[in-house]
Amino acid sequence: MTSLAGLAAAALAVPALAASPSTAAPALDSHSSHVSTAATRAAYVGSPQDEAATKAFYDAVMKSARAKMAKQAKSGQKVTAVTVTYAVDAPTFASQIASSSSIWNSSVSNVKLVEGSNYDFYYTEGNDPRGSYASTDGHGSGYVFIDYAQAQEYDSTRITAHETGHVLGLPDHYSGPCSELMSGGGPGPSCTNPYPDATERSKVNALWANGFANAAGKAAFHISK
C-alpha cells in the first residue's frame, strides 16, 4: 500500500451547527485499522509541529510518486504525469470531490488525481468545531476531513479544492484575493472560486515536473485575522 503521511493542518473554527445528526468521528483507514487521534492531528493554530508534519507528508508524496514512476518505467510504460490515487469516504461531498479532482486535472499536466484502490490519501467527513482540515493517522495514512458546518458557511467545492491543493504541494496564502485558491477562507464566505490561478497552476506543474514535490507549508482552510 502506498499512502501519504504527515500533512498537518488545521481547521477553520466555526460553531458546530446542527448540520448533520452525525458527530465528528475520527477518520479510519480501512487498510491499517488505525484511528486518528488528537496526538497526530494538528490544532488550528500553527506550530513548529505542523510544519514538521507537513514536511513528512511531502516526503511521503515524493516516495509514493517515485515508486509509481519506477514501476511504470520498468514495465515499459511512458510516464507523462505522476498519478496520485485517492479514496472517498465522504458520500455527502462525493460530487464536490469529483469536481475538485476534475478542476485540478484540467489545470495541471504533471500530476493527475485518480479515484481508486491502493490509494495515497482519502477524503472523509463529519462534525468538528475546528472545521475542515488535512491530517495523518500517525501510521502512514493521510486524509482530508470535510466539516459539515463549515461546508454550510463556505463553498464546499472551494474547501475541497483548497485542501487538495495542499496534497499537490501548495502552502496557504490567507491574505490573497478570492482569485487565489490557496487563500482559503481569507476572503470570507462570499468567495466561491474553486479554481487555482495561473501562479498556483504553474507552481504545481513545477513541483511535479520531475515526479516529486519539494515544497513545504502549513495546510489549512482558515479565516484571515
Image (cartoon, rainbow, N blue to C red):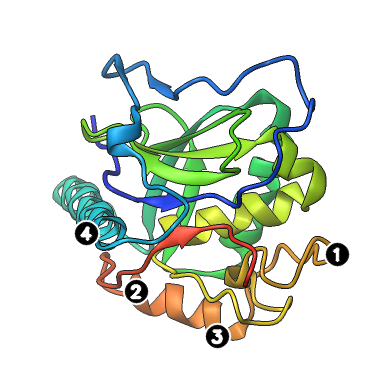
**In-image side of 10 versus 106 (left or right):** left
Marks 3,4: beta carbons within 8 A: no
Q: Secondary structure at mark 3?
A: helix
Q: Residue at x 25, y 71 (%)?
A: 214
Q: Residues within 10 Å of mark 2 (few under 14, many from 20)?
A: some
Residue 190 numbered tag: 1
Residue 207 numbered tag: 2
Q: Earlier in the sequence, mark 1 or mark 4?
A: 4
Return the residue at label 3: 199
Q: Is residue 24 above or below residue 156?
A: above
Q: CA distance from mark 3 to mark 4?
A: 25 Å
Q: Earlier in the sequence, mark 2 or mark 1?
A: 1
The residue closer to the viewer here, 13 or 61, is: 13
**In-image side of 224 versus 79 (left or right):** right
The amino acid pointed to by label 4 is: Ala
Q: Secondary structure at mark 1?
A: loop
Q: CA distance from mark 1 to mark 4?
A: 32 Å
Q: Is residue 152 above or below residue 63?
A: above
**Label 2 vs label 1, nearer the camera:** 1
The amino acid pointed to by label 3 is: Thr
Q: How far from the left and from the top, in percent, is residue 123?
A: 52, 35
**In-image side of 171 versus 184 (left or right):** left
Q: Is residue 131 above or below residue 90?
A: below
Q: Residue at x 60, y 52 (%)?
A: 12
Quarter of the image holding residue 209?
bottom left
Q: CA distance from mark 2 to mark 3?
A: 12 Å
The residue closer to the viewer here, 102 or 141, is: 141
